[in-house]
Image (cartoon, rainbow, N blue to C red):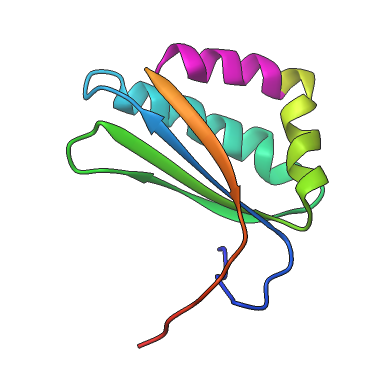
Amino acid sequence: MPQIRQDFTGQTVITTFDVTPGTAHDHLDALTDAWDKVIRQQPGFLGGAVHLNDAQTRIATYSQWQQRGDYQAMLRLPEMRDRNREINALCRSFEPVMYEVQSVFDP
């Protein structure tokens, strides 16, 4: 489970996918399989989550990595490149963006 902390010095990646209600669950299946069999097994992976909006038109993933290079190395794996082509075919677009935690608010 990712832990969002202001003192986190690793790499946070949030990816959004533009999907349709007709492809949302196929897309989720492909993402879940990639996360289970490839992504979470990679060096430097700290945790992540997959979210689907109520309208089933957007999927967002959140992942944390020890460092930026760990995430980039995962993307370069031949198996992940093949999976990303499949995942891309199931959505209108997707955009991975790297972030740094700026603030955290607790109740």
Image point 23% across, 33% down: which residue?
56
Residue 97 is left or right of residue 27, and the answer is right
| Extreme residue in the bottom direction | 107
Dominant SS type (magenta): helix
Q: Is residue 25 magenta?
A: no
**Residue 96: x and y, percent?**
55, 37
Image point 76% across, 48% down: which residue?
68
Image point 37% across, 17% down: which residue?
92
- Residue 50 sits in which quadrant? top left
Residue 6 is left or right of residue 79, and the answer is left
**Residue 90: x and y, percent?**
41, 15
Residue 20 is left or right of residue 33, and the answer is left
Q: Nearer the viewer, residue 21 or 100?
A: 100
Which residues are the magenta region? Answer: 80-91
- Residue 4 sits in which quadrant? bottom right
Q: Is residue 89 magenta?
A: yes
From this view, report whether residue 24 is shown above or below residue 9. above
| Extreme residue in the left direction | 55
Image point 48% across, 25% down: which residue?
30
**Residue 52: x and y, percent?**
32, 42
From this view, report whether residue 50 is shown above or below residue 55. below
Q: Quadrant of the N terminus?
A: bottom right
